[in-house]
Image: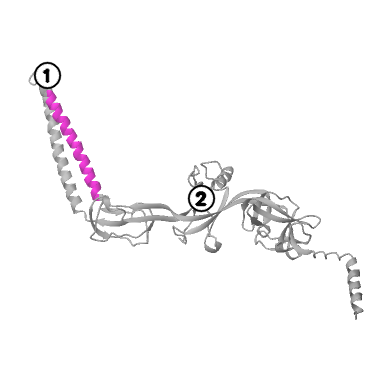
Amino acid sequence: MRNPVLPLLLAGLLLAGCHPPDEAAAPPVVGVGAYELRSTEITRSWRFSARTRPAETVQIQARVQAEVAAVTFERGARVAAGDVLFRLDDRTQRDQLRQAQAQLAARSSALELAERNLARGLEVADRGFLSASDIDRLRDAQAQASSAFEAAEADLEQARQNLEYTVIQAPIAGRAGDTSATVGNIVGPGSGPLVRVQVTDPILARFQLTDREYQQLLHQRPLGLVDTEQFEIRLLLDGDQPHPWPGALDFVDIEVDARTGTAEVTARFPNPDETLAPGLFTTVEMETREVESRLLVPNQAIGRNQLGSFVMVVGPDGMVSERSITLERQLRTAAVVDAGLAPGERVIVEGLQKARPGSRVEAIAYDWDQDSGVLAPTEMLRP
């Protein structure tokens, strides 16, 4: 017996299939935070990794060979220019000085005798008592005696210097380093440095510029000139803690090293309390005093892929598009735009993960505090 319900069900399914399908529901419009770009007055600035180094360093060596008789400084302590650092046993040098003095006296007597003989010979030569060859011999004896006297004078001066060299003094004021020379050691010109004295106030920070940064710097200052009034230079320690004293350019190299593509630069910083020591890893911030109008894009808006940097732009109709941009340089909380964006355009800074190119969004106006980098709805930052 046929089931009368089955034809009714089949008819219902056929009738349902005859109706057009429901259109797919449109995706909901998502909300994003958008920042409207505007020109900002900024100064040109650079940020470099640097190493501190002493303003001056002197390697002190022994100039004569002798035994160390006394070490008269404390390792690591400050010394003044002229302070005695080492005293060497000077007995050998004193003996050499006495010998040189005696030799000079003998050469002086020989020279006086040769000069008297020449004078007498010239007196009697006119009367025919001496021949021309005799006079030549007297002249030659006087010249040899004079040369010997001059050599003896030089030997005496060298002996005096050698005696002075047994007292080793600091040539500059600074801080004395470690030494391996102790009382009883034999030291000399071949012993290597006995101690190193460094000037750490002021102290230098050394860093490198890329060829592009070097060109930018040359646009701010002529090559070979150091204009300390043109830049503000700061030194940052761990955690971006600033050194309390501003610095000044000390030296800019005259060329870019072809091997590394960098140029050496040093900045000089006061260090009166010696909170900075040579060899520290630091950061140098250098900023020009001249102001320029540039377009800045917050770091939160910038994405990066294999093609470079990009941002998501919200058009007047709320449609999202991806825009490749070129950046000139990076600041703390933003980047300076070189190409790809114009004032008045809106870039997404909040909700980037929800925005897709070609989608429609509802943009909430965001504002940006450039000093702190905080991005928030405009009504929160500008009550």
Q: Is residue 40 visible?
A: no
The verdict on residue 148 being magenta is yes
* Residue 68 picture quarter: bottom left
Which of the pair 381/77 is nearer the observer?
A: 381
Q: Quadrant of the C terminus?
A: bottom right
Q: Residue sitting at 64 percent across and 54 percent down?
A: 335
Which of the pair 177/73 is nearer the observer?
A: 177
Q: Which residue is most to the left?
A: 129
Local packing at callout 1 (Cα closer than 10 Å; few below 14, some 14-19, many 20+) is few
> Mostly what secondary structure, the magenta segment?
helix
Residue 180 coordinates in the image, percent (x, y): 30, 60
The verdict on residue 282 being magenta is no
Q: Which residues are magenta?
A: 135-163
Looking at the image, residue 227 sits to the left or right of residue 343; the answer is: left
Q: Which mark is residue 105?
A: none
* Residue 380 picture quarter: bottom right
Q: Say which label, 1 or 2, has the lower sequence index.
A: 1
Q: Judging from the image, what secondary structure is the residue with disc 1 in?
A: loop
Task: Tell me the residue that label 1 is attached to.
Answer: 126
